[in-house]
Image (tube, rainbow, N blue to C red):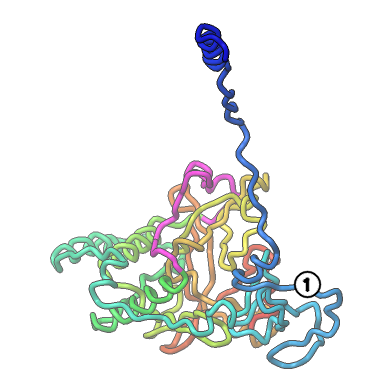
Amino acid sequence: MPPASTTTALCRRQISSRRRTSAPRRRSPSPYPPPKRMKLLTEILQKAAYTVAEREDYGDVNCEQCRSGERSEELLLCDKCDKGFHMKCLRPIVVRVPIGSWICNKCSGDGQRRVRRLSQRKIIDFFRIQKSKKDDIKKKCSPLQDSRKRRRRSLVYQKKRRRLLPFIPSADPTQRLKQMGTLASALTALHMQFSDDLTYLPGMAPPSANQAKSEQGGMQVLSKEDIETLDQCRAMCKRGECPPLLVVFDSCEGFTVEADDQIKDLTIIAEYSGDVDYIKNREHDDCDSMMTLLLTRDPSKSLVICPDKRGNIARFISGINNHTLDGKKKQNCKCVRYNVNGECRVILVATRDIAKGEKLYYDYNGYEHEYPTQHFV
């Protein structure tokens, strides 16, 4: 048996050696994120809403409506169900090939979507109608009427020029509320906000870019009398006295506008409104209601109005098929760009008397000839 002193010495050496042992080093945190675990294809297919496996040959694709495979250049393939549809067989008709992905009405649920009706309170809030007394309305209208009377009394002979006329709103407040309700329902269905003005947003064209003097070849100047008429129409809209128009849904054309009362020739129907942007930023935009605002010598400075998020009833007025005689006969209004106090504005004006119940049409290619109106009804 070893002596006690020797055993004690051995224990001390073991303890001291254990104390001198260095602790395990901690790994420094990596500057890179941990690698993500890739999901298996079977897991993705189980949870995916839909998957489309591309075929090698699409030569046997037929239209689901007419069951014909002819006119393959007009066949659209749904990115969800991979079925084919002719552009003219769809309801509403698709005028041009969509940019990017496209989903048919059945897969997107648009065919079952219903336009909901809004209450009177919601309609008033939607259009931000300003209440005013009748006396205030008479005071606002009297300067315009007095100025016209003074011009009539003038003895100086002047060449007669046709003036723009203000629209005459429906006399029945209930009918006006119904008209505004159809517009509010259509804008809500497209997830849009109502706006009667040109909107300038950060990242788009600034107000300083909208200069009528930059128009290539010049722009028609709106006279002082017509500016007063335009201001009168805008004031009436703010009071809830809208033009006598209804927005109706047509199974073939989509949302359209029809007259709810007789409209005289040269009556101001509406001013085109929406977001103002450079046309170069919208070259690949799929919005089908863009309106030319300014055409400059430098194409990079040309402007368009984009009513995809904000707009008014002008966004729903249909275009004519200017490739057929019957299509041209439908036209009952025109779109004119005016110089209004140095700023470009787009105004829709009646070109003839419009009867009650008649749909409104104008030529989409008034300034350019790029829109494929040959597909219009």
Looking at the rendered image, the quarter that the N terminus falls into is top right
Q: Position of residue 279 (x, y in %)?
A: 62, 53
Q: Position of residue 33 (x, y in %)?
A: 60, 38
Residue 141 belongs to the span the image colors magenta: no
Looking at the rendered image, the quarter that the C terminus falls into is bottom right
Residue 192 belongs to the span the image colors magenta: yes
The structure residue drawn at horizontal position 68% and vertical position 68%, both measured from the top left corner, is: 42
Q: Position of residue 21 (x, y in %)?
A: 58, 17
In the image, taking residue 331 as reference, residue 269 lies left or right, namely left
**Residue at the outermost front position:** 1
Give the answer, above or below, for where 114 lies relative to 99. below
The structure residue drawn at horizontal position 68% and vertical position 84%, both measured from the top left corner, is: 88
Residue annotated with mark 1: 54
Q: Magenta residues, as a range?
A: 191-220
The structure residue drawn at horizontal position 38% and vertical position 62%, both measured from the top left corner, is: 230
* Label 1 residue SS: loop
Residue 160, by quadrant, is: bottom left
Q: Main secondary structure of the magenta part?
A: loop
Give the answer, above or below, for where 85 lies relative to 51. below
Give the answer, above or below, for where 205 lies relative to 183. above
The structure residue drawn at horizontal position 23% and vertical position 80%, both measured from the top left corner, is: 173
In the image, taking residue 168 as reference, residue 210 lies left or right, namely right
Give the answer, above or below, for where 58 lies relative to 165. below
Crowding near pointer 1: few (<14 within 10 Å), some, many (20+)?
few
Residue 101, by quadrant, is: bottom right
